[in-house]
Amino acid sequence: MQTVETLNEGLKRAYKITIPAKDIDAKVDGELKKIAPQIRMPGFRPGKVPANLVRKMHGEALQQQALETAVQEGVQKLMTEKKLRPAMQPAVNLEESGDGKDAVVTVELETLPDVPAPKIDGLKLERLSVEPGEDAVNDALNQIVQGQKSFDPAPAKHKAQKGDLVIMDFVGKVDGEAFEGGTGEGMSVEIGSGRLIPGFEDQLIGVKANEQRTLNVTFPEDYNVDHLKGKPATFDVTVNEVQTPRETKADDEFAKAMGLEGIDQLRELIKGQLSQELNGLTRTHMKRKLLDQLAADHDFPVPPSMVDAEFNQIWAQLEHEASHEADPEAARKEMEAEREDYRAIAERRVRLGLLLSEIGQQNGVEVSQQEMNQLIMQAAQQYKPADRERFVQYVRQEPMAAAQLRAPLFEDKVVDFLFSKAEISDRTVTRAELEAEIEADVDGHVHGPDCNHDHDHGHAKPKAKKAAAKKADEKPAAKAAEDKPAKKATPKKAEAEAPAKEAKAEKPAKAEKDKPAAKKAPAKKKA
């Protein structure tokens, strides 16, 4: 095999590999010897079919297989001999082959940079701590009580008011004609819950059992059914029953109904959950400050392909967010105006990911096999039961899939290691103060990885209320968070190899027919 370097610019590399035809033929001959004893052909005893006939029957398939194997081995040998660490999937193209010709293969890739020795001495962090007070516990307890609300039938002459439950039949009409999905029977709605489109619930105030009423509403401009957006409509409502909320007290009886010993145990559980939530906020703030210091002290080139991949991920999330804004076009214009800001975020996240990887490797941070097994099992739960074993096998066979699962935990362990090295001072604050500090970070008032500036320039990026960028400090390019194994040199396999995740989308439209024009739920935001 002959290898010639054709490009060496920055982190970009390109090579031409020539694989002699005789090497490929030798692989074909080897495969022929393996399969010949298994071949059955009329007129010949088992295993006695002449080699030339076997070649005639299976030669083309064996030639293709031998070529693919030779290319894989050639690219892997290139990676090993040149000590290359690909940043992304290398582009492998077969330029020439067949008819006794040598196979000529081109390989193009970007390499991971040599990260300079990380500076982790002298880190200083402030830990903002919040103790869950009695008021917070009481608020959370009241929310639980409200969530367990029950109702009793109201007297026949009772007029519905805010907080009451109305059970009704309805027929929705646009331009005097009933529309699909606008008719239902026996639907319950709590007045003031905000479940239905604006104005609907308010017009139920004052209704009584067996009363008929026509409601006039207008569908929102961002309603999730195109032909109803912004349209005025009427709903002919027949009230079957009005129910009033039963008084629910936060006492021992209430707690025992939840399977607990009493109200004190429930309060302790709530306090524990609040502490866990507040500790998470404290960690988020500390992690952002830590990453800010690392970003300030380290600057090195990063692979453009990794930056492109990270930027595309951010941009896709922004597109999703924009599609759910009241004015999607205006949101997209704002995005476009800040495109370079988001590219700077992507570059920063990639650099931090590579830096954390280097710190982890230099200091023996590892994800154990037991931890990895737990990650795989947890991820498998996102799939249908029938597909879970396929997913587990896919991850075990594909190094890159395993690396992507491992990366977030690896990153967290590196962050914990850095916390242990840092000089940490403590300050007790309120929850509002802690949340304000975190919000200030994401709005660009501090120099974190989600800010668009270099420290020697000193300017912060404009506020961006998009979920994809808000938590950039918490997610420095997870897929770069540890050294990736060299990928197979074969073309990228189809996504069909991994089983599709179990759908958790909203119910299909016809399942909504028992609801009158429910207000569109906001899309879940992903960081």
Image (spheres, grey):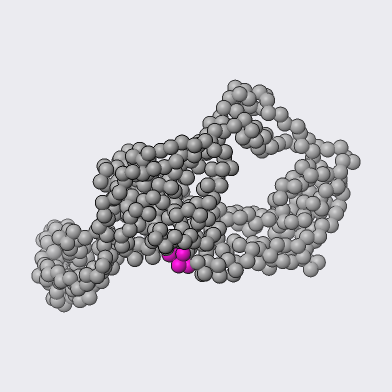
**Which quadrant does the N terminus fall into?**
bottom left
Magenta span includes 28: no
Relative side of 188 to 472, left or right = right
Pick the residue in front: 397 or 110.
110
Pick the residue in front: 370 or 414.
414
Q: In this view, does 384 lie above or below 38?
A: above
Question: Residue drawn at (44%, 53%), measured in percent from left and top?
Answer: 448
The quarter of the displayed image where residue 244 is located: top right
One can see residue 371 in this view: no
Magenta span includes 341: yes
Pick the residue in front: 84 or 441.
441
| Main SS category, magenta section | helix
Relative side of 123 to 97, left or right = right
Q: Where is residue 229 in the image (x, y as percent from the top left)?
A: 69, 66
Q: Where is residue 269 in the image (x, y as percent from the top left)?
A: 56, 29
Q: Residue furthest right?
A: 157
The quarter of the displayed image where residue 115 is located: bottom left
Question: Residue drawn at (77%, 56%), measured in percent from left and top?
Answer: 199
Question: Residue drawn at (61%, 24%), measured in percent from left and top?
Answer: 264
Region of the chain picked out in magenta, as a range = 339-343
Q: Is residue 398 above or below residue 220?
A: above
